[in-house]
Amino acid sequence: MSFSEDFRRIQREISRLASDMERFLESFEPWVRPVIRGRERSIKEPLVDVYEAEDKYLVIVEIPGVPKDKLILNASEDMLEIRGEVRPVDVKGARLISKEIIHRAYNRTIRLPDKIKPEETKARYQDGILVVELPKAEVPKKVSIKIE
């Protein structure tokens, strides 16, 4: 075999391995995607976990750096909207040497699987973690219908 043939064979093998690895990671899609894209996504919008209990939904939101009084929550019959803004800290008498903190506005809308009671929604916020409890709306019970 010539050098170019060997090189093309190795190149094909590397491409095949990359495809196999991508398919393997896709099999773990629900767990891998947040890890791979979590940092990128958290810059643009807060990361959210949604839980379902028998009578309510719990939404846990990671929003570091947003003061409680700068958070805005709106709930409708099947959605929760979260808005907030991370503002720069005013440091006087010092010059900036390195900047990694991104000052940004958050806006995240979460659609819930069922209707809720927005007027009974409760929220608490501590140490950059927002916990929102959204009571489920009453589901009409099954009713027997008499045939006349």
Image: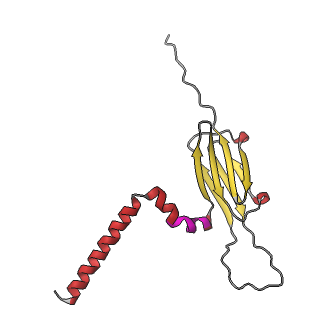
Q: Write the residue at 58% across / 40% down.
A: 114
From what the image shows, is residue 52 above or below residue 69? above
Q: Is residue 48 above or below residue 137?
A: below
Q: Is residue 92 left or right of residue 42?
A: right
Residue 83: quadrant of the picture: bottom right
Question: Quick one: 145 or 65, which is closer to the camera?
Answer: 65
Residue closest to the far front: 127
**Above or below for 86 versus 6:** above
Residue lying at the far top in this picture: please name it: 148
Q: Residue furthest bottom?
A: 3
Question: Which residue is located at x 59 percent, y 36 percent?
Answer: 54
Q: Which residues are magenta?
A: 36-42
Give the image location of residue 81, x and y in percent: 66, 52
- Horizontal and vertical percent position of residue 49: 59, 53
Residue 89 magenta-highlighted: no
User: Seen in the image, is 145 located left or right of residue 9?
Assistant: right
Residue at the image point whose x is 55% and y is 20% from the top: 143
| Residue 111 place in picture, x, y as percent | 59, 48
Magenta: main secondary structure: helix
- Residue 109 falls in image quadrant: bottom right
Question: Residue 63 at x, y = what percent?
Answer: 68, 61
